[in-house]
Amino acid sequence: MAGGRISRRLAGVLLLALAQATVGLVLGAAVTTPAAAQQFDDRFPFLFNRHNNNGSWFGFPDDRRQAPRAAPVVENTHAPAPTRKSDAEPLTSVVVLGDSMADWLAYGLEQAAADSPDIGILRRFRSYSGLIRIEVKNDPKGEYPDWPQAARDMLAADKANFVVMMIGLNDRRPIREKAPTKTSTQAAKKDEKKDGEKEKDDKDKERDSASNEAPAEAPSAPGEGEHISGGMITYEFRSDKWTELYIKRIDETIAALKSKNVPVFWVGLPPVRSPKISADLSYLNDLYRSRAEKAGITYIDTWDGFVDESGRFVMTGPDFEGQTRRLRSPDGVHFTEAGARKLAHYVEREIQRALMANATPVTLPATDEPAAAPQPAAPRPGAAIARPLAGPVMPLTTPAEANELAGGANAHQTATDAIASKVLVRGDPPRVPAGRADDFVWPRRPVAAPGIDPVVATTTVPMTPMQPYEPHQVASAAPSTAGPAAPAAPVRHTPVRQAAANPRPSASTYNNQQQQRRIQPQQQPFFFPFFGR
């Protein structure tokens, strides 16, 4: 009996110790699970993390978990749709033609002219087109037009005050034309002959008869960068012949744009993320610039606005206001809203210059001018007159004539002060008061009493009449005249009374006015000052 009790007590103690050990292991596992998870997976590879097996245990897939969705593809080729401003026809219309770059340019111009109802932006673009036309079997929407003819048709149907062209992104491709044959080459040579060259005609006939023995339709040998296949000859991009044909297409397009007889602007292409494509676009820009200058239209260079200090392409940079913004879309070719606005700023600036050059003067209503102050009677020749306390006021803020060239003859002859003409023009030495710093008479003369020195008190030179400081103000009283002043009765002046007649603003009032002028913002709307907000 005693042995059985002891065994039962030992079993109870063992069970209690086992239970305590189990609880301790569970708590320790709960605390150390995050740190020991990696070791647990290494020891038991068949129990790796659920996240590594799409939420499954033991490597079996979990059908209840959905596969991750692919990121949506963002369309960057097309700019946002234009916002309708008004049904009324705008006073000034800007027609923008070209490819997808022109679409973003027109969008930026719309943002610039959002507060100007008199400005209308017309989008006439074909996103995937170029000056090199792609021959397609079915093109009902006209996405691949022949731009010289298409531009004429678009401009004939629209009212255009300015024409803007931006194209070339899709022109980095070969040009294909029908391969010329020997027969056509001979016919072209015959057309170029002159009537007076009989001997040359005979030689050409002999050469033609000899060549007739060869097949009539044999194509001519291709040159460098040319390939002939299926009766078509292909000129590779940047080859000499390709450049010649592409320049011809540029000239034809410019001629079509100028048919409207309005200012034409050809906008150069900006760089893109691909260095190779950027080099190709730079080559096309050189062609656009040269042909635009020859045709007499304005070429607008936008390259420097989308590169850094080293000339490398940037996705983020300063916008047209100087704030750092993202300028290019994720494809590295097109633009964001800030980038389109910066692109449009280049064109907006040139349009403003054209408006300033063609501005017509506006007739303002006439205002009643104040009556002129009565002029004093002219003194006798050679008589001494009283010298005024101060000379005529000459405002320093008066703007100069903007329509006169430097050094040219001024049609408006202004009155010249007699003393200034005597000293500066004729070179006569001026008379100075006795004892002044510039009195070089020897021996030195003492300073004369006030009103005694004849140089200071009187003069015999005709004085320039006093003029008011502001144009709309009139002098309250004409300058008084006096007879010859005698030494015994000097002419005395009262500067305090004259200052009281025309009080001047205090220093604090003047400073407040100047500060208000500095802090007042100046806003100029689009195409300022011709069209208001």
Image (tube, rainbow, N blue to C red):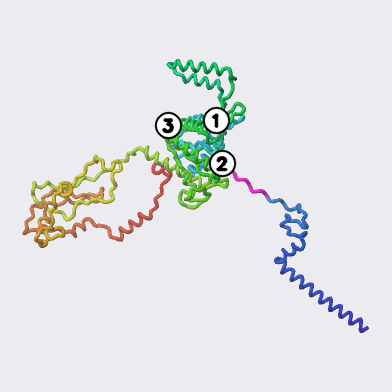
User: Which image quarter: residue 491?
Assistant: bottom left
Query: Which residue is under mark 3?
Result: 261
* Left or right: where 63 falls relative to 427: right
Which amino acid type corresponds to the residue marked 2 in the rendered image?
His
Against 376, residue 13 (above or below) is: below
Where is residue 342 drawn, in percent x and y?
48, 46
- The extreme bottom residue here reads 2
Q: Which-is-in-front pick, marks 3 and 1?
A: 1
Where is residue 179 drawn, in percent x and y?
57, 26
Against 235, residue 412 (above or below) is: below
Pointer 2: residues within 10 angstroms few (<14), some, or many (20+)? some
Q: Secondary structure at mark 2?
A: loop
Q: Dividing the image into 4 quarters, which one contains the C terminus?
A: top left
Q: CA distance from mark 3 to mark 1?
A: 40 Å
Pointer 1: residues within 10 angstroms few (<14), some, or many (20+)? few
Which residue is nearer to you in this view: 477 or 471?
A: 471
Query: Which residue is under mark 2?
Result: 78
427 drawn magenta? no
Q: Mark 3–mark 2 contact, CB under 8 Å?
A: no
* Left or right: where 25 falls relative to 221: right
Q: Please report the bounds of the magenta region as a residue range.
A: 69-84
Q: CA distance from mark 3 to mark 2?
A: 30 Å
